[in-house]
């Protein structure tokens, strides 16, 4: 009597399944920081950005916003979440709801150029 094909494959299938379960895929790749030669020059980078999105900026950056005092009427709820910066004599808060739409705020305060990114 000739065994069926399923019976003949069993001795081969079991070791293959064991190898697959062990993850025998070879050593993990080595991570290294990017080298200066890996990065494109500025002209090439800008060409790639323009080709991929059509414009350099895909959202409206807020530049030199007008800040109001926290005690004034500003339309922000008392429990609203903000991202803040404390510079000692000056504190600045960026409402997260605003950053969800604009993502970047650039301004100068106390002679420091600040860039808030969300």
Image (spheres, rainbow, N blue to C red):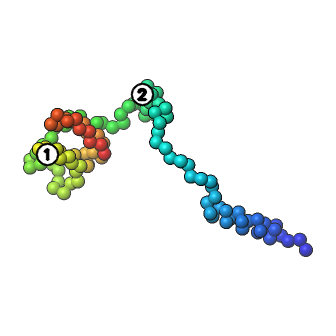
Task: Using residue 85 as the reference point, say whether residue 118 is left or right of it.
Answer: right
Residue 98 can be seen, yes or no: yes
Residue assigned mark 2: 42
Direction right: furthest residue: 1
Quarter of the image that includes the C terminus: top left
Residue 4, percent from left and from top: 83, 70
Quarter holding residue 23: bottom right
* Marks 1 and 2 in Cβ contact (< 8 Å): no
Instruction: Tell me the residue at 22%/51% (across/down).
Output: 82
Helix, strand, or loop for circle 1?
loop
Helix, strand, or loop for circle 2?
helix
Quarter holding residue 7: bottom right
For marks 1 and 2, give the one nearer the viewer. 1
Task: Using residue 20 as the reference point, say whether residue 33 is left or right of it.
Answer: left
Direction bottom: furthest residue: 1
Q: What is the total number of numbered labels drawn onto the structure image?
A: 2
Q: Earlier in the sequence, mark 1 or mark 2?
A: 2
Instruction: Tell me the residue at 56%/52% (across/down).
Output: 28
Identify the mark at residue 88; answer none if there is no mark.
1
Instruction: Tell me the residue at 17%/50% (across/down).
Output: 76
């Amino acid at each position: 009597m000739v065994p069926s094909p399923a019976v003949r494959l069993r001795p081969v299938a079991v070791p293959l399944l064991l190898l697959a379960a062990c993850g025998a895929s070879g050593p993990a790749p080595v991570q290294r920081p990017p080298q200066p030669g890996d990065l494109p020059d500025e002209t090439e980078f800008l060409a790639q950005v323009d080709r991929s999105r059509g414009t350099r900026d895909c959202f409206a950056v807020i530049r030199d916003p007008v800040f109001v005092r926290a005690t004034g009427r500003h339309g922000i709820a008392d429990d609203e979440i903000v991202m803040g910066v404390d510079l000692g004599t000056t504190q600045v808060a960026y409402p997260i709801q605003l950053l969800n739409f604009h993502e970047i705020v650039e301004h100068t305060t106390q002679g420091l150029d600040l860039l808030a990114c969300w």
